[in-house]
Amino acid sequence: MLYRKMGKTGEEVSLLGFGAMRLPTAEDGSIDQELSVAMIRKAIDSGVNYIDTAFTYPKSEKIIGEALKDGYRDKVFIADKIPPWLIRSEEDKESLFNKSFERLGVDVIDFFLVHNLNAPIWRKTQKTDLISFLDQKKKEGKIKYLGFSFHDNLDLFKEIVDAYDWDFCQIQFNFVDKDFQAGEEGLKYAADKGMGVVVMEPLKGGRLTQTVPPSIQEIWDEDESDTTPVQWAFKWVASHPEVSVILSGMSSMEQLDDNLWNFSDPMIEEISGTGRNLLDAVTKEYKSLIRFDCTGCNYCMPCPQKIEIPRVIGYYNDWRAFGEASNIMFEYSTWLGRHASDCVECRACEEKCPQHLPIAEAMKEAAEVMGL
C-alpha cells in the first residue's frame, strides 16, 4: 500500500481510502452488513488506514462501528461528515454531532468534515455558526482535524478555503472533471495553504467505467499497453502530488481486491505523455457527447421553483455521455429535492445565463428522458 502525508497535519495516510457510501447490498437491496464488515477489515489488514463515511450515508456509520471493533479502531483514521442542511437550531448541531459518535462507537473522530458545501449550504453554515461550534469541538479533543467536502464553483471554493484555517478538504476530481468545480486550480490552491486534499469520484461515480459509449471504447482499444481504463483514471489522479487520499466507493470484494492491487503498484503515481494524450482524447470525446455545455457558474440561480439548475443539467449531460448508467438515475432521483419536471418555463434563468443556454428546453428534455 502506498502512503502520503495529509498536508500540514503530518499524518501518514494510505493513498487509497475506503469510501463507505456505496457499500455492498444483499438480494433484497438492503446493505449486506456481514460482507461490508469483511471488506472493511480486509482493506485495513491490507494497509488501508483512511475510512470515509457521513451522517447521511445509510447505515454506514453503524457498519463502520462494527468493523472497527476487536482492535481495528486503533489501525485507522475515521473521516465523518456533518450535514449543515439538517441544522435548524443550536440543539441540532449537538444532536447530529453526538449521533455520529454514538453510531460509530468512538470517543474521537480523526478527520471531521462539513458536508457537501455549495453556495446555499455554505451560507447556512455561516448563519448557524457551525464552524465555531466545530472549532470548539476540536479544541475539546473530540475531533482531531477539521475540513469540508465541496460541490460548487472555483470562486466559492477559494472563499471557503480562506474563511478558516482548515486542515484538509475533499473535492471531486478525475481526468474528465479536471476543470470542474474546484478542479486542478482549486487542488493547488488548497495544497499551497498546507491543506491535505482528499479526492472523491476518481472514476466519476463509476461513470468512466460502468457503461462505456462505443466511441469512447474505440479510443481505449487503441491503447497498446496492458493498463485498464480504471488504472488510467487512478494513475491520472495519483500523478498529482497535492492529492493525499483517493477515495473509492467499493461495493464488492472484487472491486476491493482490484483496488488493493492497483494501489500496491508504485507506478500508479506515474503517467507518461502517451498516457496523458490518451486520456485527453477520451475526455475530448466525452465532452463532444455533452448536450448542454453548462459551466456550473450558478448565475442562473436562484430558481423561483428551487430547482438546482446546474446539477439537473449536469445529470442530464452525464446520462447522455456516460451510457445511461443506472447510478446516474439513482443520484438524480434521490439527491435532488426538485427535478426538471418542476420547471414552469418562466425563463428567468435564461436571462441571467452568460452561456445563453436554452435552459427551459434542457429542463424539458431532461424531464422527458429521466422521467422526473
Image: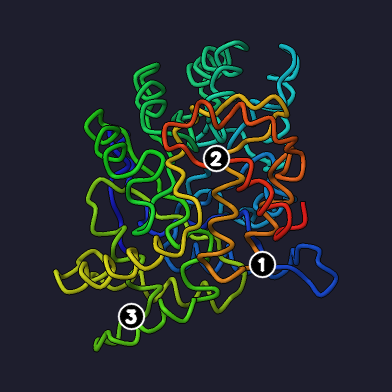
Quote the CA–CA distance across marks 3 and 2. Answer: 29 Å
Residue 97, picture quadrant: top right
Q: Residue 49 carries which label?
A: none
Mark 3 vs 1, N-terminal side: 3
**CB contact under 8 Å: marks 3 and 2:** no
Q: Which mark is residue 310?
A: 2
Mark 2 vs 1, N-terminal side: 2
Crowding around mark 3 (Cα neighbors within 10 Å: few <14, some 14 to 19, many 20+) is some
Residue lying farthest to the left in this orientation: 273
At label 3, the amino acid type is: Ile
What residue did someone put label 1 on? 326
Q: Residue 219 carries which label?
A: 3
Answer above or below: position of 56 versus 160: below
Query: In this rendering, would 370 be left or right of 318?
Result: right
Residue 48 in the image, given as x and y percentages of width and height: 44, 60
In this rendering, which labeled residue sits more in front, label 3 or label 1? 3
Quote the CA–CA distance across marks 3 and 1. Answer: 23 Å
Residue 90 in the image, given as x and y percentages of width and height: 71, 11
Quote the CA–CA distance across marks 2 and 1. Answer: 20 Å
